[in-house]
Amino acid sequence: MIANWTPYRVDGEIGRFSFRRHRLEQEGEVIFDSRGDWFPALVGEQWYPTHGFKEIAMFYGTAKRPYRETTLMINRLRRVEEPTPMRSLREQSEREGAKLQAHLERTSEAILEAHGLGVVEGGGRPEASFGATVVAQQAAGVVTAAIERCTDEAKAREEMAANPIPYEDPCWSVNVAVDDVGVKRQRAVRRSGGEPELETPVSEVTAGGTTEEKKYVQTTVAHVETEAGNYVLSGLGVIALLWQVVAFLLANGLIRRRLIVFVDGQRSLHLALAKVLSCWRTWQVILDWYHLEKRCRENLSLALKGRHIRNAVLEKLLALLWDGRVGSALDYLAHVPSEQIKDPAELQKLSGYLERQRPPIPCYSVRKKLGLRNSSNRGEKENDLVVARRQKHDGMSWSPPGSIALAALATATRNEEVERWLRTGEISFKLAA
């Protein structure tokens, strides 16, 4: 039995320590070596993080708190003589998050391939049809009774009943809320004078009216929910994340259900949904009520003379839209008295927006009476918990790998996957009650 010269370094929940490893040789041949047989190999000055250390310092530490704050906390609690450096903790966290995200992507791709949706030559995916062939809806009598409870006006009832968006049966549908957030991207390239330079800038208009170029890391979060539970997915890029959502639905036996997707008015998101969900027979987009109300308020503030006129027009307009009466809302905007208008172009912009968004605008009032969702706020809340609350503080900037790695760690905690991941190196990919 021969002791290996290099000590094995461990970063654990009880502190940092090291020990000697041994190997057994017989006639010059290594029979057993604890360096590879028992303990994972380390590179350079790397320390091996135990499962307990990962849970405390990463999933419930750096995924929620700044690296410096987490480093001070764990070193203080453990009272170690040789504290864990902040840089080491950051590298360990990003490595663990990247490993988790890669596993999630491999799992999703394997599921897609098993269902005939694997990537083919050229980068596309073959056509396939999943989802319900017949849409399970609320009974006609139930919908009619809900409309009657909303208004006594015959014309309004007629227009509400004509809204083309059906009222789904919650037991045969899946609610999916999709939202993305941009965090400031690190400046990786420097000019000759030493000043950082952005690689592919995004122009923004500042308060002074000038344009400023910035770059962001866009992380997309999806919240999937049925009566059995919910699950959160995160990733870089809307298209890639939506394919993960499809894989999750297939893995959980939700093939015969209708998809109800709650989004804001972002045009690129609508285009991505149309591209990916072409593989699903029945799906419907619902425009989030909060974003619709916000857009109307903003445009009318610019279009009309004074807040009193704005508020009066807004109240009438929102009442029509709440009942899903887009045609009447457009007609109302077209007949706003000219003496009340400050900027006709802004009023025209709002009319154009409502016309474009007509397909995903439901009858919100009836949906509320039937106990159905009208908002994408659950997706936005998960985005806040997974990404924004941790990564959108003043002065913070991120690389794409670092941002998505922390998002992966936070997502695992939301899905209660931490224990399984640390124990087996796998995730359940199942709805969490």
Image: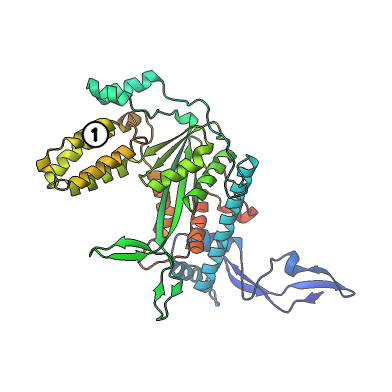
**What residue is shown at x 24% (from left), y 35% (from top)?**
330
Left or right of residue 133, residue 393 in this image: left
**What residue is shown at x 19% (from left), y 34% (from top)?**
332
Q: Position of residue 324 (x, y in %)?
A: 30, 31
Q: Nearer the viewer, residue 159 or 36?
A: 159
Where is residue 378, by image quadrant?
top left
Q: Quadrant of the N terminus?
A: bottom right
- Disc 1 element: helix
Residue of label 1: 329
The colour scheme used here is rainbow
Q: Position of residue 272 (x, y in %)?
A: 46, 45
- Label 1 Cα neighbours within 10 Å, binned few <14 / some 14-19 / many ≥20: some
Left or right of residue 178, residue 8 in this image: right
Q: Is residue 234 visible?
A: yes
Q: Is residue 404 above or below residue 29?
A: above
Q: Is residue 280 above or below residue 213?
A: above
Q: Nearer the viewer, residue 74 or 323?
A: 323
Q: Position of residue 333 (x, y in %)?
A: 20, 37
Which amino acid type is marked by label 1?
A: Ala
Q: Is residue 222 above or below residue 171?
A: below
Q: Position of residue 31 (x, y in %)?
A: 84, 68
**What residue is shown at x 60% (from left), y 54% (from top)?**
103
